[in-house]
Image (spheres, helix red, strand yellow):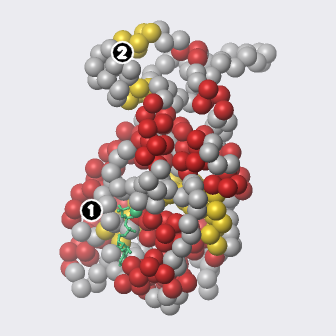
Amino acid sequence: MIITCPHCKKQHNIDEKRIPPNVKMARCQGCGQQFPLDIPRETPPPTAQPPKPAAPPLKSEEAAAPSWKPSQETRRIGVSLSKGGVGKTTTSVNLAAGLALAGKRVLLVDTDTQGQSSFMLGVKPKGGLTEMVTGELPPEEAIVQARKNLWILAGGKSLAGLKRLIDRKDYGGELTLAQALTPLEKDYDYVVVDTSPGWDPLTVNVLFYVNELLTPVSLEVMSIQGFGEFLKSIASIQKFRKEVQLKYILPTFRDMRVRKGTDFLEQLEKLYGEKVCTPIRYNIRLSEAPAYGQTVFEFAPGSNGAQDYRDLIRKVTGEPDLFT
Ligand SMILES: Nc1ncnc2c1ncn2[C@@H]1O[C@H](COP(=O)(O)OP(=O)(O)OP(=O)(O)O)[C@@H](O)[C@H]1O
Ligand SMILES: [Mg+2]
């Protein structure tokens, strides 16, 4: 069939039988931009038929990748907002660490080139997500145990190479992360994914992997505006993958002295009700803990920051008696 790139109108002659059914985006070889693939699929006949042989994979990378079969048990939570500095990494690390303290097995995945999650936990893995996806390191070496029940797949500068690898794929680049993580997730109760600010191929990959989004929103006008933009971006992904849902809105940097923050919080609660979590208060201990490679539960267990993140963990697990 012929498909036309909506950006540059270049026509591509493709064999639709060779494209795996879960691939939803294609990259134009003319202008290099991605666009949605809308391929009519045959509906299977109602009577049982002998299975047809699987279509050959498109590329050697895909041949090596395991098929993507979502796990029912493991919860996949992406911590994401395009705006920078709203508390994504602080939340990812303390959420993951708190869940681990509560006895859950947790994998923290850092998809940010800043690589701050491993720094915050005081570990220095020799590789991480990039090295695992490219096969430079086997998963058992790329994934490092950071605490009891807590493992990390680190991010960092090498993710630039992973983004290029995703960009070079003609089809299915958005599933790279899902294909890499799905075979591993059975070992964990939770996979928590920290994302970078902005919007790049890895962010799209995260949205094609996680089912639940936790969005920290700093209680200030720019962040609230960024949240509106982010909702539009999520909606554009949901057209292809309805499983990804905004589940938690986490107000951050709550400062009781600032009246505007209270107004923003009230607006969020009015619009999003139950999705809005108890805010994380501005707490200096949260910003000091990373310098010691410690979570807030280790550095200042009695602080407001630790209390607020415990509250978040009770909400996420649905276990109100945790830590009592
Ligand atoms: N509730 C808080 N109170 C005080 N400081 C905080 C709080 N939450 C985060 N911080 C500090 O604010 C800064 C930004 O937080 P963080 O790195 O978690 O944001 P981010 O959204 O991950 O940023 P980026 O978009 O750059 O990845 C850090 O120095 C962090 O220690
Ligand atoms: Mg961050």
- The residue located at (41%, 59%) in the rendering is 114
- The residue located at (46%, 43%) in the rendering is 161
At label 1, which amino acid type do we have? Ser
Furthest-bottom residue in view? Answer: 302
Question: What residue is pinned by disc 2?
Answer: 4
Marks 2 and 1, the one that precedes in the sequence: 2
User: In this rendering, is residue 250 above or below 209?
Assistant: below
* x then y, percent, for residue 255: 29, 81
Ligand 1 within 8 A of label 1's CB?
Answer: no
Report if the CB atoms under discs 2 and 1 are less than 8 Å apart: no
Ligand 1 occupies quarter = bottom left
Question: What residue is pinned by disc 1?
Answer: 223
Left-right relation of 184 to 168: right
- Quadrant of the rendering where the C terminus is positioned: bottom right
| Secondary structure category for the residue under label 2 | strand
Total labels: the figure holds 2
* x then y, percent, for residue 239: 42, 35
| Secondary structure category for the residue under label 1 | helix
Ligand 1 within 8 A of label 2's CB?
Answer: no
